[in-house]
Image (tube, grey):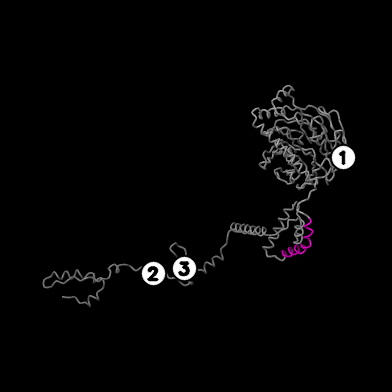
């Protein structure tokens, strides 16, 4: 019996799957013919039991709450995010960080604008611009470069704030009279033209320094290469000699405090000056007999120094003059030109020129033969106090109340080195005989050793308990360094490692100055206690003569 196709079509899916077993059972009964098995439909069977996957969530209208995502956070629309940002509050720390960042960015922009601004370098023009902008033309303690930097910052901020009207007014007022002033400005060069005598002096100094430098270098090479030269032994002898220094004699030098002292080149005469304005020449070695009394200054004498080549000496005074004398008391020259009192005086190694420092912020170079002023050198922002010449004669050093030590090339007139390190005024400078070390002492109680080759401070000596009034190298080889101080002491330091060798105590007041003889056998000190003291080695003369035979000392 053949099944009805319509019935077969109308059967549900479950009946179609169970029909084959029913037909197989009827075929096994008698009276029925064999019926072929019904083939199931061709559609894949797994489609029926597969459950329907849920549809993706449909976006709801804005009036409904957004559906929750798989991570549990609600999805918000653009309008919702904008409303949330309006009510978001940042912390105080974040606000401060943002303000600092904005300020740093603003400062950077100001610096960039300032770097591109054209600001005059003339101090008078800078003051005029500040006045036009309604700003103070100067502040307390403000220097020229600081004033120019302040003007640059003001112009840059005006440009950034859009206040170009003020900026244009300032620029127009500067540009307008410029055409009239151009002719006058061209009359003044950027340098100070020196006299013909200065040019000749520079040439002569250059020739002199070349010869002296060649001799110094040749001697240094010989000492280095000669096997008979024992530099360590010589240094030990010199330090031992300095360590044995004791007070040899003491005498009153004047009725007023003494301010300076100097040995003659042969060590037979000692010159001292005092606040009374009188300079006295004493006979060595006991400073009991007065050779001459030099009286011509109208104010107190501040310094005295002997010439390195002949028997003449120079004195400096608060009457704004320096004077050149012979040892018999004859006045040779008077150097006038400084606008304020003088501090120190020094001879050039050639003996032909004299250097003076003054409280008018300048130091000057004079020709001792003609008395003419060869050089007026500016460079210090405050009073100039100390001065020294290198033994070759090529360089000069100056120090002042601006806490600086400057090194000048006398052959070109340039300031080649500026040593910064002292925190208070520097009162004294002195070159080492080796030619490349410079010692300086000042009000900060320190003595600094500067290396001209490395252009920096080599050593800092905490020298005294009060200000250092003078520093002086041993004149032969710089074996030791002596420092005088207002703590009433004179200290001797090793020139090799700058350790303390000897402390000379005996004065009852401030030690104003010191000097060392050419053979380093005696040290003279003068003080505000009005006394002169001579310090010599306590070793026996026989031992010294034996040791001198093994040394190479230029007497």
Foreground mark, 3 or 1? 1
Task: Give the secondary structure at mark 3.
Answer: loop
Q: Secondary structure at mark 1?
A: loop
Considering depth in this image, is 169 or 354 the residue closer to the camera?
Answer: 354
Is 528 positioned to the left or the right of 414 in the image?
A: right
Residue at which label 1 appears: 297
Crowding at label 3, few (<14), some or many (≥20) Cα neighbours within 10 Å?
some
Task: Tell me whether the residue at label 2 lies in contact with that at label 1, contact meaning CB atoms closer than 8 angstroms.
Answer: no
Q: Is residue 292 visible?
A: yes
- 82 with respect to 182 (left or right): left
What residue sits 75% from the left and 60% below the top?
129
Q: Taking 178 as reference, is 196 above or below it?
A: above
Q: Which residue is mark 2?
A: 55
Give how far across and how far down residue 484 sits, in percent: 76, 35
Q: Quadrant of residue 365?
A: top right
Q: Quadrant of the N terminus?
A: bottom left
Q: Position of residue 239 (x, y in %)?
A: 70, 29
Q: Earlier in the sequence, mark 3 or mark 1?
A: 3
Lower sequence index among marks 2 and 3: 2
Q: Is residue 361 among what the camera can see?
A: no
Q: Main secondary structure of the magenta part?
A: helix
For disc 2, the neighbor class at 10 Å (few under 14, some 14 to 19, many from 20) is: few
- State the count of labels: 3
- The Cα atoms of the two marked residues, 2 and 1, are separated by 116 Å
CA–CA distance in space, label 3 to label 1: 104 Å
Reading the image, the residue beneath label 3 is 66
Q: Is residue 5 above or below residue 185?
A: below
Residue 175 on the magenta span: yes
Q: What are the residue bounds of the magenta stretch?
A: 166-187
Residue 496, x across and y down, in percent: 67, 33
Membership of 279 in magenta stretch: no
């Amino acid at each position: 019996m053949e099944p009805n196709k319509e019935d077969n079509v109308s059967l549900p899916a479950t009946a179609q799957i169970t029909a084959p077993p029913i037909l197989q059972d009827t075929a096994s009964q008698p009276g029925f013919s064999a019926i072929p098995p019904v083939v199931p439909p061709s559609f894949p069977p797994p489609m029926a039991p597969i459950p329907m996957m849920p549809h993706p969530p449909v976006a709801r209208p804005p009036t409904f709450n957004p559906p929750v995502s798989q991570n549990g956070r609600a999805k918000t629309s653009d309008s919702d995010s904008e409303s949330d940002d309006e009510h978001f509050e940042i912390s105080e720390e974040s606000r401060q960080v943002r303000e600092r960042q904005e300020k740093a960015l603003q400062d950077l922009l100001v610096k960039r604008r300032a770097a591109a601004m054209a600001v005059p370098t003339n101090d008078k023009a800078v003051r005029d611009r500040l006045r036009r902008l309604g700003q103070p033309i100067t502040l307390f303690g403000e220097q020229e470069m600081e004033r120019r930097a302040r003007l640059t910052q003001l112009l840059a901020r005006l440009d950034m704030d859009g206040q170009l009207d003020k900026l244009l007014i300032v620029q127009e007022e500067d540009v307008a009279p410029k055409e009239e002033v151009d002719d006058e400005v061209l009359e003044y060069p950027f340098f100070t033209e020196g006299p013909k005598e200065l040019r000749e002096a520079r040439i002569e100094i250059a020739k002199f320094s070349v010869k002296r430098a060649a001799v110094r270098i040749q001697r240094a090479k010989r000492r280095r290469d000669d096997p008979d030269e024992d530099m360590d032994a010589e240094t030990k002898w010199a330090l031992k000699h300095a360590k044995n220094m004791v007070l040899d004699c003491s005498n009153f030098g004047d009725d007023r405090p003494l301010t300076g002292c100097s040995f003659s080149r042969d060590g037979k005469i000692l010159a001292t000056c005092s606040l009374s304005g009188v300079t006295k020449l004493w006979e060595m070695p006991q400073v009991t007999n007065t050779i001459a009394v030099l009286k011509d200054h109208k104010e107190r004498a501040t310094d005295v120094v002997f010439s390195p080549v002949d028997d003449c000496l120079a004195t400096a005074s608060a009457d704004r003059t320096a004077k050149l004398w012979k040892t018999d008391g004859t006045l040779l020259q008077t150097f006038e030109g400084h606008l304020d009192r003088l501090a120190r005086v020094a001879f050039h190694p050639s003996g032909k020129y004299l250097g003076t420092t003054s409280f008018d912020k300048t130091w000057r170079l004079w020709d001792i033969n003609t008395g003419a002023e060869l050089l007026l050198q500016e460079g210090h922002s405050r009073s100039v106090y100390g001065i020294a010449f290198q033994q070759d004669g090529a360089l000069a050093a100056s120090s002042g109340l601006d806490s600086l030590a400057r090194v000048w090339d006398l052959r070109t007139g340039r300031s080649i080195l500026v040593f910064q390190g002292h925190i208070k005024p520097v009162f004294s400078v002195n070159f080492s005989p080796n030619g490349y070390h410079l010692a300086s002492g000042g009000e900060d109680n320190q003595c600094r050793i500067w290396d001209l080759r490395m252009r920096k401070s080599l050593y800092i000596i905490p020298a005294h308990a009060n200000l250092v009034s003078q520093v002086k190298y041993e004149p032969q080889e710089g074996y030791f360094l002596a420092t005088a101080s207002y703590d009433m002491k004179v200290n001797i330091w090793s020139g090799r490692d700058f350790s303390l060798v000897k402390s000379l105590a005996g004065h009852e007041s401030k030690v104003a100055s010191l000097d060392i003889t050419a053979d380093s056998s005696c040290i003279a000190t003068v003080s505000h206690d009005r006394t002169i003291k001579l310090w010599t080695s306590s070793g026996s003369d026989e031992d010294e003569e034996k040791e001198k035979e093994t040394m190479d000392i230029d007497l």
